[in-house]
Image: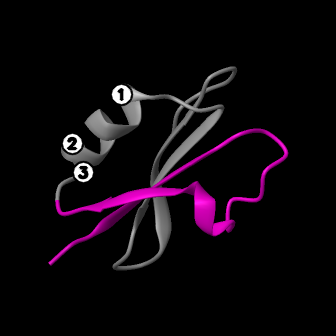
Amino acid sequence: MRRYILLQYMHGQKADDPLSMAGTFDDLRKAQAAAGERLHDVNEIIDTNDWTVVWRFHKHGTRL
């Protein structure tokens, strides 16, 4: 079963800071919806099957 981890953090904050983890989800769309509810400077969703970033949104940049 796939699991997705939502990381949300501000510029200058470390992505591996435990405070950046905003939740875990079974569905990518639910993770994206949760990210959209309160966008931070950097928003990333990681697929725990292979630990890759599958979605990224920067307030001042681009998405993956």
**Would you name the residue on which mark 3 appears?**
28
**Would you name the residue on which mark 2 appears?**
29
Local crowd size for mark 2, using a 10 Å CA cut-off: few (<14), some (14–19), many (≥20)? few
Circle nearer the viewer, 2 or 1: 1
Name the secondary structure under disc 2. Answer: helix
Whether tag 2 and tag 3 are in contact, CB under 8 A, the answer is: yes
Q: Kindly report the distance in space between the C-alpha atoms of the residues bearing marks 2 and 3.
A: 4 Å
Circle nearer the viewer, 1 or 3: 1
Q: Kindly report the distance in space between the C-alpha atoms of the residues bearing marks 2 and 1.
A: 12 Å
Q: Amino acid at mark 1?
A: Glu
**Which circle's residue, 1 or 3, is located before the other in the chain?**
3
Left or right of residue 23, residue 3 in this image:
left
Name the secondary structure under disc 3. Answer: helix
Q: Amino acid at mark 3?
A: Leu
Q: Residue at x 20, y 44 (%)?
A: 30
Q: Is residue 42 above or below residue 50?
A: above
Which residue occupies the extreme right position in the image?
A: 12
Whether tag 2 and tag 1 are in contact, CB under 8 A, the answer is: no
Say whether residue 8 is magenta.
Answer: yes
Q: Is residue 26 above or below residue 13?
A: below
**Would you name the residue on which mark 1 appears?**
37
Local crowd size for mark 3, using a 10 Å CA cut-off: few (<14), some (14–19), many (≥20)? many
Q: Residue at x 24, y 51 (%)?
A: 28
Q: Amino acid at mark 2?
A: Arg
Highlighted magenta segment, given as a residue range: 1-26
